[in-house]
Image (spheres, rainbow, N blue to C red):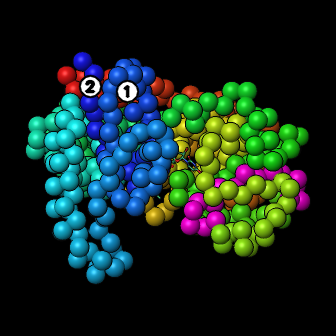
Amino acid sequence: MAKRIIISGGGTGGHIFPAIAIANALKRIDPSTEILFVGALGRMEMERIPAAGYTIVGLDIRGFQRKSLLKNLALPFQVISSLMKARSVIRKFKPDAAVGVGGYASGPLLYMAGMMKVPYLIQEQNSYAGITNKWLGKNAKKICVAFSGMSQFFPADKILITGNPIRKEAVDIAGKREEGLSSFGLSLEKKTILVTGGSLGAGTLNACMLKGLDRFIEEDIQLIWQTGKYYYKSILASVGDKPHVNVCIVEFLDHMDLAYAAADVIISRAGAGTIAELYVVEKPVILVPSPNVAEDHQTKNALALTNENAAIMITDIKASEELINAAISLVKDKQRCTMMSEQIGHMALPNADEVIAKEVLLIAG
Ligand SMILES: CC(=O)N[C@H]1[C@@H](OP(=O)(O)OP(=O)(O)OC[C@H]2O[C@@H](n3ccc(=O)[nH]c3=O)[C@H](O)[C@@H]2O)O[C@H](CO)[C@@H](O)[C@@H]1O
């Protein structure tokens, strides 16, 4: 009989896209699987999940606001109302299993799933687990992770190292270089650097690109520059409405495959999902880990690559000084690019999406 699965979580692309990858794999294995997403109202998942063709229900839940304690006054009420809504969603949808990918909505949904005896699986993308996932891990049937050493956060007998699930369409780049460059209005003859700050963009990378823009233009190197939603308008205001022909500035890349295919070199934050994709697209990459994440986990993500000579890492603090020169010399160094592409390709854990989907179906009975 067709299984019914709830997938919960979101907040940033780092949680949303693995969730979509798992859903797509569930559908590939059994197209009759019924999937319902549960996210947080007002967050990115409320747009991205329907765009991927799935139904989502929103809970009115936010995280703890460290910057404004006043804003937390409503938090206990939000938690209670989210738990009630999670209970009614579970009652109505009657899932055989639930999946949590992290983000605000995972907490109330998985807690209620546990209370209502719905078996659940957690997918943890990072080498560090937050407090909610650690707590939810106790009652999980399975915890799928991408890094070793996760038994410090979760019961060892429930852990399965699967790697991070990625959307197949985001990394399907074979034969798409020309289409990719044309889609960004760029020339096929010139070297091209893709700059991505993860799903929300990165202030440091944007500042570096602004500072180095003239250097790239002098060197006749093309840029696909993803700014992120929050920075887009101010970057355009600084660069001017009509940037140089070598430069394509976008708020968000809807077709990662075309951007990856067009790039000779990639400059990126070190989010776990992006890294899992970089393993597969096999391009030379410079990682600038975000210093603003729990336990500095992006540096750990990046070190896994630099230890294998599979990427260059530049710290956030040194980026302003070093990034532009490093990128220009890398894109001109064919031999180093080839070596780095080979090394990064060895790190892929393919088919994480299907391995996880099979585990979900297993716990769903
Ligand atoms: C600041 C922050 O909290 N970052 C965290 C967040 O990163 P973030 O949300 O940036 O997520 P990742 O880097 O893991 O993945 C980004 C995802 O967004 C997609 N994408 C990105 C840009 C774009 O324009 N279009 C697009 O589709 C990428 O293809 C990728 O699938 O979640 C990750 C996974 O939990 C963590 O490792 C990061 O530390």
| Residue 308 x, y percent position in the rendering | 56, 37
Which residue ends up furthest to the front in the rendered image? 92
Magenta residues? 217-232
Above or below, comparing residue 343 to residue 286 in the picture: above
| Residue 337 x, y percent position in the rendering | 73, 38
* Residue 17 on the magenta span: no
User: Which disc number belongs to residue 3?
Assistant: 2
* Residue 219 on the magenta span: yes
Secondary structure beneath dot 1 equals helix
Quadrant position of residue 98: top left
Above or below, comparing residue 98 to residue 111 in the picture: above
Write the residue at 78% across / 70% down: 240
Q: Quadrant of the N terminus?
A: top left
Secondary structure beneath dot 2 equals loop
Write the residue at 81% across / 48% down: 185
Report the mark closest to the observer, 2 or 1. Answer: 2
CB contact under 8 Å: marks 2 and 1: yes
Q: Amino acid at mark 1?
A: Leu
Above or below, comparing residue 277 to residue 357 in the picture: below
Q: Nearer the viewer, residue 142 or 54?
A: 54
Q: Amino acid at mark 2?
A: Lys
Rounded to the nearest angstrom, the CA distance separating label 2 from label 1 is: 10 Å
Quick check: 341 left or right of 74? Answer: right
Write the residue at 63% across / 58% down: 251
Quadrant position of residue 265: top right
Quick check: 339 left or right of 349? Answer: right
Q: Nearer the viewer, residue 107 or 56?
A: 56
Between discs 2 and 1, the one toward the N terminus: 2
